[in-house]
């Protein structure tokens, strides 16, 4: 059958067979469910992580990375929790779990994709701090915002190939193309995956809004920060010239957050600095 005649996937079809959904490690799911639990136990979280020796070792490696700039060595999971806080530990565990869940996705350059994803999350976290938005939640959504693309390619790689030839998956216009051809976009898929994994509703809502943050029923500051972070990540990953980066700047989105291109260019560190040490999370 010619590629152009391949049946296009539906949103329901991508998600109505639970046994075919990507599986993230149980500890990551449990930690993410604790987002909404104000009485979450420090000891319980430490025990969940400590029960997985590989995850514990990776968390300690990340806690001691250049990203966090701690003046002393973090030697235990308990120390990591105290120094990093619950939310950042959840984020680190989540990033590792997502990379593992989609390790064999076809039709995508996974190394480039996760590089871009990490750039987006760290840039979005910096932008959130500038805009007065909850930065750790923005980092969570930044890490997760591309999972819809991954699942589309994992579940329907042949159907995605014609779209990939027309436009790269990382381009800003990709969501509009998907909606035109499929009737939904990768943000919709990401939101539904988050619900399948029982992540908090505010995260699912923000994931749906990230690709087109001005079109939702209400404006999400979290989604807007990630949208801007993705713009900055694409520019740095592709070494875009300053004038091209400026032309692609989502000015209306930035203005809603009280940010400007001039301020971002003047103050934001290069993304290799913002992400230094965190690459191990996605290995």
Image (cartoon, rainbow, N blue to C red):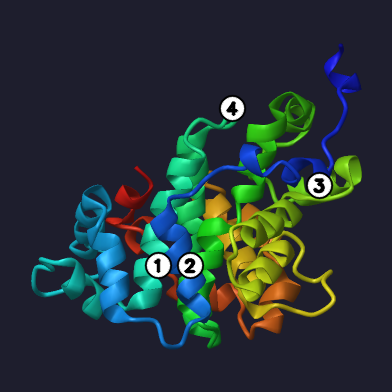
- Which badge, 2 or 4, is on the more N-terminal residue? 2
The answer to whether residue 34 is left or right of residue 64 is right
Disc 3 from disc 1: Cα separation: 28 Å
Where disc 2 sits, the SS reads helix
Please give the residue where the numbered disc 1 appears in the rendered image.
Answer: 90
**Dot 2 surroundings within 10 Å: few (below 14), some, or many (20 or more)?**
many
- Which badge, 2 or 1, is on the more N-terminal residue? 2
Please give the residue where the numbered disc 3 appears in the rendered image.
Answer: 11
In this view, 43 is above or below 210: below
Question: In this orientation, which residue lies closer to the viewer: 122 or 76?
Answer: 76
Q: Quadrant of the C terminus?
A: top left
**Dot 1 surroundings within 10 Å: few (below 14), some, or many (20 or more)?**
many
Badges 2 and 1: C-beta atoms under 8 Å apart?
A: yes
**Residue 149 position by quadrant:** top right
Please give the residue where the numbered disc 4 appears in the rendered image.
Answer: 106
Disc 2 from disc 4: Cα separation: 27 Å
The answer to whether residue 210 is left or right of residue 279 is right
Residue at the image position 43 percent from the left and 54 percent from the top:
26
Residue 241 position, x and y percent, is 56, 50
**Dot 3 surroundings within 10 Å: few (below 14), some, or many (20 or more)?**
some
Question: In this orientation, which residue lies closer to the viewer: 123 or 46?
Answer: 46
Residue 151 position, x and y percent, is 64, 41
Tell which tag, 2 or 1, sits nearer the viewer: 2
């Amino acid at each position: 059958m010619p590629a152009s005649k391949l049946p296009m996937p539906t949103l329901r079809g991508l998600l109505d067979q639970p046994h075919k959904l990507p599986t993230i490690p149980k500890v990551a799911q449990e930690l993410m469910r604790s987002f909404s639990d104000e009485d979450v136990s420090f000891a319980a979280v430490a025990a969940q992580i400590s029960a997985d020796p590989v995850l514990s070792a990776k968390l300690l490696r990340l806690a001691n990375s250049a990203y966090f700039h701690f003046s002393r060595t973090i030697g235990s999971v308990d120390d990591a929790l105290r120094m990093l806080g619950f939310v950042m530990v959840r984020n680190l565990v989540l990033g590792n779990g997502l990379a593992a869940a989609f390790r064999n996705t076809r039709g995508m350059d996974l190394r480039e994709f996760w590089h871009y994803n990490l750039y987006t999350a760290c840039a979005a976290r910096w932008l959130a701090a500038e805009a007065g938005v909850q930065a750790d939640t923005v980092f969570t959504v930044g890490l997760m915002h591309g999972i819809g693309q991954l699942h589309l390619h994992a579940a329907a790689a042949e159907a995605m190939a014609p779209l990939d030839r027309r436009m790269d998956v990382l381009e800003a216009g990709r969501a509009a193309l998907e909606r035109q051809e499929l009737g939904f976009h990768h943000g919709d898929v990401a939101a539904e995956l988050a619900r399948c994994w029982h992540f908090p509703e505010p995260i699912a809502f923000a994931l749906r809004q990230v690709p087109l943050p001005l079109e939702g029923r209400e404006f999400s500051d979290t989604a807007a920060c990630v949208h801007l972070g993705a713009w900055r990540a694409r520019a740095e990953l592709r070494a875009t010239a300053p004038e091209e980066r400026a032309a692609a700047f989502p000015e209306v989105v930035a203005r809603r957050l009280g940010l400007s291109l001039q301020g971002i260019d003047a103050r934001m560190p290069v993304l290799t600095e913002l992400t230094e040490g965190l690459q191990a999370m996605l290995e």
